[in-house]
């Protein structure tokens, strides 16, 4: 559905936000890669505590946009405020501190396969403190270990805490990755296709758990998905990216899957 079609159906193409409650504000964000304009003046606001699903076809620039938010990919133009920080003005130390406040969950979990689930979750504390006491569970303070066990409990995995990650199923591994993100005590979570590598049943279960945990602790969430049900059912708001621009920005309950198919045509 085009922006014009959205307007005809009274679907807002932009959602107004009170400036005081905005966690992420991107304006005119632009990025070219391989000689091609990938982001072409993206304006995006995410309110505190909101869950926003970012959709769009392969190559639309979703992952690039997520990475630009933390300058993992350097934007060429535009302004960017995240958690009240002027991201483009930050130097290395400030950027490190900001990144520590943001949890990142990827399609592939990026866990250390030969280490236990518990140790991998403890690694989430590296966002807050450095040194060997957050490298291995045997070296960790009891309080850190307890918190990591609590995070594993929240994703229903206490019983595999001591098991190596390479012996876990895909669904269990992705839950460990979520527990590691919780351990970070993030203020904002960015998730790039967090359940894309899971089978439909595991994907549904993990997605529901993930969004529920974020809501319970009122963490702002920006995630991408190619699963329209996951975008519509779990987000407050849905944003579609096409040809490097925001083509739709609407409350998730104002649209349905049929409205969105046009974005993939
Ligand atoms: N380092 C790079 N060098 C050149 N081109 C790149 C680079 N990274 C990404 N691209 C291109 O940028 C475009 C957008 O990529 P991006 O990964 O952001 O898309 P996406 O919307 O996340 O797609 P998908 O749904 O497949 O994950 C693609 O055409 C991709 O090939
Ligand atoms: Mg992507």
Image (tube, rainbow, N blue to C red):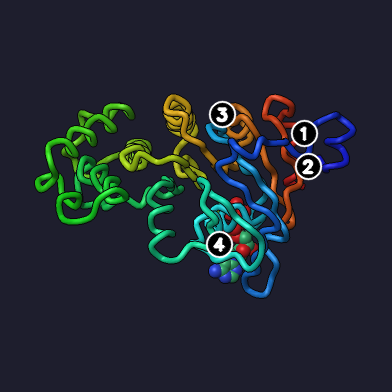
Disc number lying in front (4 or 2): 4
Q: Are marks 1 and 3 in contact (CB under 8 Å)?
A: no
Q: Which residue is the site of mark 1?
A: 259
Disc number lying in front (3 or 2): 3
In the displayed structure, 29 sits above or below 185; it is below
Q: Which residue is the site of mark 2?
A: 262
Q: Which mark is residue 88?
A: 4
Q: Which residue is the site of mark 3?
A: 234
Task: Give the distance between the C-alpha atoms of the residues marked 3 and 2, in whole angstroms.
Answer: 21 Å
Question: Who comes first in sequence, dot 3 or dot 2?
Answer: 3
Q: Is residue 90 left or right of residue 174?
A: right
How many residues crowd around disc 3 within 10 Å: few (fewer than 14), some, or many (20 or more)? some
Question: Who comes first in sequence, dot 1 or dot 3?
Answer: 3
How many residues crowd around disc 2 within 10 Å: few (fewer than 14), some, or many (20 or more)? few
Disc number lying in front (1 or 3): 3
> Which is more toward the observer, 80 or 111?
80
Where does the image place residue 154, in percent across and percent down from the top left?
32, 27
Could you say whether the residue bearing mark 3 is in a helix, strand or loop?
helix
Disc number lying in front (4 or 3): 4
Task: Give the distance between the C-alpha atoms of the residues marked 4 and 3, in whole angstroms.
Answer: 30 Å
Task: Give the distance between the C-alpha atoms of the residues marked 1 and 3, in whole angstroms.
Answer: 17 Å
Disc number lying in front (4 or 1): 4
Image quarter for ligand 1: bottom right
Q: Is residue 166 visible?
A: no
Question: Who comes first in sequence, dot 4 or dot 3?
Answer: 4
User: Which residue is at a point 46% across and 36% down the rendered structure image?
Assistant: 199
Q: Are marks 4 and 3 in contact (CB under 8 Å)?
A: no
Please, which residue is most extreme toward the bottom here?
A: 35
Could you say whether the residue bearing mark 1 is in a helix, strand or loop?
helix
């Amino acid at each position: 559905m085009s922006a014009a079609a959205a307007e005809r159906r009274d679907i807002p193409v932009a959602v107004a936000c009170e400036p005081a409650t905005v966690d992420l504000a991107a304006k005119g964000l632009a990025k070219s890669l391989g000689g091609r304009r990938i982001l072409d003046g993206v304006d995006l606001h995410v309110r505190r505590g909101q869950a926003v699903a970012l959709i769009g076809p392969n190559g639309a620039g979703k992952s690039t946009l997520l990475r630009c938010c933390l300058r993992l990919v350097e934007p060429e133009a535009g302004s960017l405020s995240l958690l009240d920080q002027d991201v483009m003005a930050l130097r290395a130390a400030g950027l490190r501190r900001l990144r520590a406040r943001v949890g990142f969950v990827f399609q592939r979990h990026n866990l250390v396969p030969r280490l236990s689930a518990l140790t991998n979750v403890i690694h989430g504390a590296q966002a807050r403190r450095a040194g060997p006491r957050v490298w291995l569970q045997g070296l960790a303070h009891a309080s850190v270990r307890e918190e990591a066990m609590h995070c594993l409990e929240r994703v229903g995995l206490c019983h595999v805490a001591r098991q190596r990650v390479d012996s876990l199923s895909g669904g269990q591994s992705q839950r460990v990755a979520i527990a590691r993100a919780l351990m970070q005590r993030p203020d904002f979570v960015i998730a790039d296709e967090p359940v894309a590598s899971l089978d439909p049943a595991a994907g549904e279960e993990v997605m529901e758990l993930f969004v529920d945990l974020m809501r319970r602790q009122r963490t702002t969430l920006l995630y991408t998905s190619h699963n329209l049900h996951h975008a519509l059912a779990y987000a407050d708001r849905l944003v579609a990216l096409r040809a490097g621009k925001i083509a739709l920005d609407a409350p998730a309950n104002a649209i349905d899957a049929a409205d969105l198919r046009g974005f993939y045509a």
